[in-house]
Image (spheres, rainbow, N blue to C red):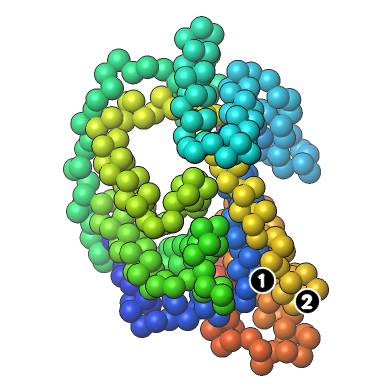
Amino acid sequence: MGMVVLAGVVVMLLVATGLRERVMNAVPKSLRKGIAIGIGLFIMLIGLVDSGFVSRIPDLAHTTVPLQLGGDGHLNGWPVLVFVLGSLLTLALIVRKVPGAILISIVAMTAVALVIEALADLPGQAWGLTVPEWPGNPVASPDFGLIGQVSLFGGFAKVGYLTGALFVFTVLLSCFFDAMGTILGVGDEAELMDKDGNFPGINKVLLVDGIAVAAGGASSSSASTCFVESTAGVGEGARTGLASVVTGLLFSVALFLTPLATMVPSQAATPALLAVGFLILAGSVRDIDWSDYTLAVPAFLAMMMMPFTYSITNGIGVGFIAFCVLRLAAGRGREVPVAMYVVSAVFVFYYAMPALGLT
């Protein structure tokens, strides 16, 4: 966890020097829109997978098809029905412009799931991570014992300085560009960008993100960063940051109500991701310059690689590299900002690390 803290410190240094903002402002508008669409598709896929509507086919099946409907190629079972009904209800409420559409759907489908579980008594694995059951004791005391149990450089002594440095680099790259993609996607959906497609006051957001990465490691947790699921709040009208403050306060309360919070099944919550993913896609796809292939192809690759690789960072990396290569091929290399070349070179090294024996 000490290495995660170090990655967070490096992120904050990049913000303080202005390098992180420079990288974000160097991304062309069409590629930014492609990143936003990729995030929309990604959260839609997350919703479909977490709900059990689609699942990964085991390698032993010897098939070239990676995903299938349901758990066995068919849609069956009460949990899937809850997800389908929740998706239809969410979209219907959004179409009707009902305030709080997503929250209404989650509460309603959680109630339906509780009734189904009480009557059908389904096995726990049918619902996935959380089973819709009323807990015997809705209150539980959280364990804060791991907070601060961190050694900044202890990991280097165990794995070696080169391996440790590469680990910090990997965490840094993931945090840097996952946050970048999320900020661009959420900011675009919230209509917070200026006429040039830049995010006003972005340094404040980036600094908080860096602090969160370090704080996550200091609490013996994974790196904390901005979440793409924030688009659910934007879909309900969140713009000023107050929704995030309220969410944080509610999470603080939820620390003591974990048994109560875990009775909400994924099938009741994931329709929100499906709906918001569509809203992001619909709001961004028309703004890509499809007539300029040096912009359209990188945007397309970015939006496709995010869901296909289950990684925002991979989508951004492929999009950046493709943009630089295609602009050079078109004889327009001087139009590419230096920051894009530098970041693309970093991504090439990142992708080459396994072949170089550095992972």
- Disc 1 is placed on an element classified as helix
Residue at the image point whose x is 56% and y is 88% from the top: 338
Outermost right residue: 291
Residue wearing tag 2: 292
Pick the quarter of the image with the N terminus: bottom left
Residue at the image point whose x is 35% and y is 45% from the top: 247
Tell whether label 2 touches label 1 (CB within 8 Å): yes
Outermost top residue: 119
Residue at the image point whose x is 60% and y is 29% from the top: 89
Whole-percent x and y of residue 78? 60, 18
Residue wearing tag 1: 30
> Which residue is nearer to you in this view: 328 or 357?
328
Whole-percent x and y of residue 22? 47, 81
Q: Quadrant of residue 293?
A: bottom right
Q: Residues within 10 Å of mark 2 (few under 14, many from 20)?
A: few
Does residue 293 appear to the left or right of 235 in the view shown? Answer: right
Does residue 67 appear to the left or right of 186 in the view shown? Answer: right
CA separation, marks 1 and 2?
A: 10 Å
Outermost bottom residue: 334
Q: Is residue 93 above or below residue 316?
A: above
Q: Residues within 10 Å of mark 1 (few under 14, many from 20)?
A: many
